[in-house]
Image (spheres, grey):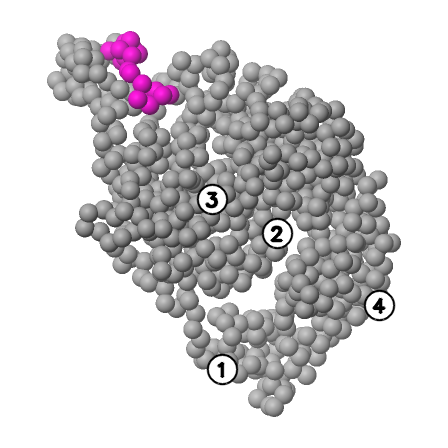
Amino acid sequence: MQCKHTKNPGATLSYSALEDQFAKVPALVRRGLCRSYVLMTNARVSAQAEARIRDRLRAAGVSHPLVFGYQWLCATIAAHRALRLFVPRVYGLGDLSQILDERAYAQASVLMASARDQLATFVVTEPYRKAAEALRSYRFVLLLGEPAVGKSVIALMLAIAAADNWGCLTVKARSASELVARWNPHEPGQFFWVDDAFGAVRHDEQLTSDWLRSMPHVMAAIGIGARVVLTSRSYIYQDARRLLKEYSYPRLREQQVIVDVEDLSPEERRQILYNHIAYGDQPPDVRRAMKPFLDRAAEVRPFRPEMARRLGQRAFTTGLSITVSGIETFMARPRQLLRDVYSEFGADEQAALTLVYAAAGKGHLQSPLALDVKQCDIITRAGSTPAGTARALESLTGSFLSPAGLAPTPLRAAPYPPLPGEPPRRLFTWQRTVNPGWAFRHPTLFEGFAAWLSTQPHLLTVVLAGLSDDALLASVDCAVEDASLAHGILLRMPPPLYRGVAERVATIAQRSWQRTCWDGWEDWRATQRTVLGFLATRSSDAFLSTYLQIDPGLPARLTEFPRFASFVEGAPEPDALARLHQAHLLPERNRLDAVEQMTRLAIGTPDAGWLHIPAWQILLKPAERASLMDRVRRELVPQFGTDQDPIPGERLEDEDPFERALYDYQQAFEEAGDPQTAAAFAAVLDACLEQPIASPDDWQPEWDDDPERRYVGNAGSLAPRPVPGRSIFDDIDR
């Protein structure tokens, strides 16, 4: 069997392209290995060409020559919906409007219309197969992986497949709250896709808290038929897990599909690289020069599909040394490479990208440009002009930037003409939810630009001044002294700018403290959580020292916790206190106040968070931990079964925090060699667990009874198999 692939599906097959195959057939026939010969190609084969091919093969001794061309492939694809689920790249073979018939939703049409490049280069990999099977069987997928490994592309292909296989109405949400707001219980066939669910570059505790509050609704939506795909960088999800209460929702553990570059087989790597080079815009002479080194490039560890895409784009390869070492360095070291690329850009391009970066806190740079004083200052300092910057924004779109503001949102249901014999159907109408503009095409491009911008002092000051409060807290890093921060490059501030950043952060914090609980409570809580997270995770010792000069009352305020919840777990104050203590900047009286507050919570709530939260491993001395255990034994246990019993009379939720505290205390006293006290906590815990509660997870349907499930054969048999002795890159320069 011979598979002949062409870069342009539907193009006419060249008869001369088969000469190398015709030369091999006689030898195979003499060895008895070629009674039948199948030629399969995505090129068009005319009736005359098919007859010539068959006559040539019969003359060589083939008894049964078969030729399957473009028309046969399209007919087979149209007839097998399950095939399209596991081989989504076939959507690129024909007109997308032919695949989505009148029963499809407008959402999927909009999504697919912008996905032609991804469809053309997509390769079915083992992670995609796992994700497709999980989505079909359990309706939930959590895609985890490192940056640039293809999580978003897999999610996009799943959305397209869901629209085709189940007629799903697709919504690309930005947060859990938006997902819940768009969930329609009367429309079970919805598909929700959320990229970077817990933060794009670093863990965003606000997003995670939003998921924690919304998870019962999300699981209820899944239970009645909705399908949900989340993506996240692995290191961000590891931080989010401690707040997400993963143990309360087993599907978060059971149905996650880890997109690991180590899962890509050598054939998959080579096919990914081939597709991106073949469908890129590199001229033939460059592809010809690259060809000897591409097999080695596919073996680079770690292999990132996003870097394969960039290797096929001229915009990313200016000045690239086309040698073994040059291409391997390109594939393996994207951050340094991007810094070099940004350095080689002209003033117009640098000004355009700086404007987009500075506007990231607002979501994107709006179009048309309406420049304010700060933006004009950025353009002037970069050595550009407004006209040159506007031209650069257009020229960078498609490579470094992507059009923003195009995310469709369902506004209202509208009648749709039904098929014969079907009841009336409904679809959603769409409009731009925000003003159009520009945003970075990929998070790694954003990170790389931040790394480059940190080396440009003439731009750094004005960019800092132009950042909104939210953007400053989300994208600035003042922890340059900490070499362990290897993930998520942000805009790193040099020490001379620490005071300016500290003044901004202190102003943000003090402004939020002036609000009351009746005046913007949610905003106040979110701002305080973000500010304290910044101080705890992205502040060096020197920055914290500078900050305390501006806000000396911070340590005392931090001892008044928890402000955002009933329990200390998830409260940001202990993390900030622990960070100050590590930097030797926490006064001892404030540390003792924090210990006393935790003691009151441990007995009165009761709250066992101090047993396992890392911050309390730092704040509590060994003697204080032992004393606290003794006070729990002497003061809390005697209250059980009395009028002062702190245990509530009913269960509030499935993983009740009181139950978690009882269980933690039971385990702690068992480990301490006090079985009597442990038994007392176990008895109370058993009594609590006897009280039933209603939970959305209790009425999940049996997935195996889903009538929509269809059996799909071994998808691996559909993957291309290399011909021994040949390289897939042999025709890359044609």
Are the residues flagged by discs 1 and 4 in contact, CB closer than 8 Å?
A: no
Tell me the distance, in whole angstroms, between the alpha carbons under discs 3 and 1: 54 Å
- Identify residue for label 3: 431
Are the residues flagged by discs 4 and 3 in contact, CB closer than 8 Å?
A: no
Rate crowding at label 4 as few (under 14), some (14 to 19) or many (20 or more) other CA atoms within 10 Å.
Answer: few
Residue 60 x/y as whole percent: 17, 10
Residue 549 in which image quadrant: bottom right
Q: Which mark is residue 589?
A: 4
Amino acid type shown at disc 2: Asp
Q: Is residue 607 above or below residue 491?
A: below
Q: Is residue 716 above or below residue 30?
A: below
Q: Disc 2 on helix, strand or loop?
A: loop
Q: Between tags 3 and 2, which lies in front? A: 3
Which callout, 1 or 2, points at the residue further toward the start of the chain? 2
Q: Which mark is residue 204?
A: 2
Q: Pick whichever, 139 or 44, lies toward us.
A: 44
Give me the residue at 47% from left, 64% from top: 216
Q: Pick whichever, 427 or 727, lies toward us.
A: 427
Residue 29 x/y as whole percent: 18, 14
